[in-house]
């Protein structure tokens, strides 16, 4: 098994009634929601689990990584 590397995750965007486009303009994020109110950068919340977007672990979610790598993720 290859070693861990700096992981990048897909952002999770949530629509909120108070949302808008500031996350897009201020943080340079790209999303299609008309009223984006939150951008989760790392999450293990059921239904909104972050997914790796780079390297050989691409497509795996954070919950899967914790099951396989446990303490190696945080040192």
Image: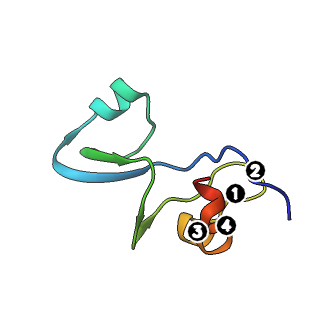
How far apart marks 1 and 3 lie (CA) works out to: 15 Å
Could you say which is closer to the camera, residue 15 or residue 73? 73
Disc on res. 15? none
Do the CB atoms of the residues marked 3 and 4 lie less than 8 Å apart? yes
Q: Residues within 10 Å of mark 1 (few under 14, many from 20)?
A: some
- The earlier-in-sequence mark between 3 and 2 is 2
Q: Residues within 10 Å of mark 4 (few under 14, many from 20)?
A: few
How far apart marks 3 and 2 lie (CA) works out to: 17 Å
Q: Position of residue 47 (x, y in %)?
A: 40, 72
Do the CB atoms of the residues marked 1 and 3 lie less than 8 Å apart? no
Q: Quadrant of residue 60?
A: bottom right
Q: Secondary structure at mark 1?
A: loop
How far apart marks 1 and 2 lie (CA) works out to: 5 Å
Q: Which residue is mark 4?
A: 69
Q: Position of residue 72 (x, y in %)?
A: 66, 59
Q: Which residue is mark 1?
A: 58
Q: Secondary structure at mark 4?
A: helix
Q: Which residue is mark 3?
A: 66
Q: Quadrant of residue 29?
A: top left
Q: Which residue is mark 2?
A: 55
Q: Position of residue 7 (x, y in %)?
A: 64, 48
């Amino acid at each position: 098994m290859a070693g861990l590397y700096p992981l990048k995750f897909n952002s999770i965007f949530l629509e909120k009634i108070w949302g808008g486009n500031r996350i897009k303009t201020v943080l340079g994020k790209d999303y299609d929601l008309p009223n984006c109110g939150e951008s989760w950068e790392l999450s293990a919340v059921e239904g909104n689990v972050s997914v790796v977007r780079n390297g050989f672990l691409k497509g795996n979610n954070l919950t899967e990584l914790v099951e396989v790598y446990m303490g190696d993720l945080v040192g």
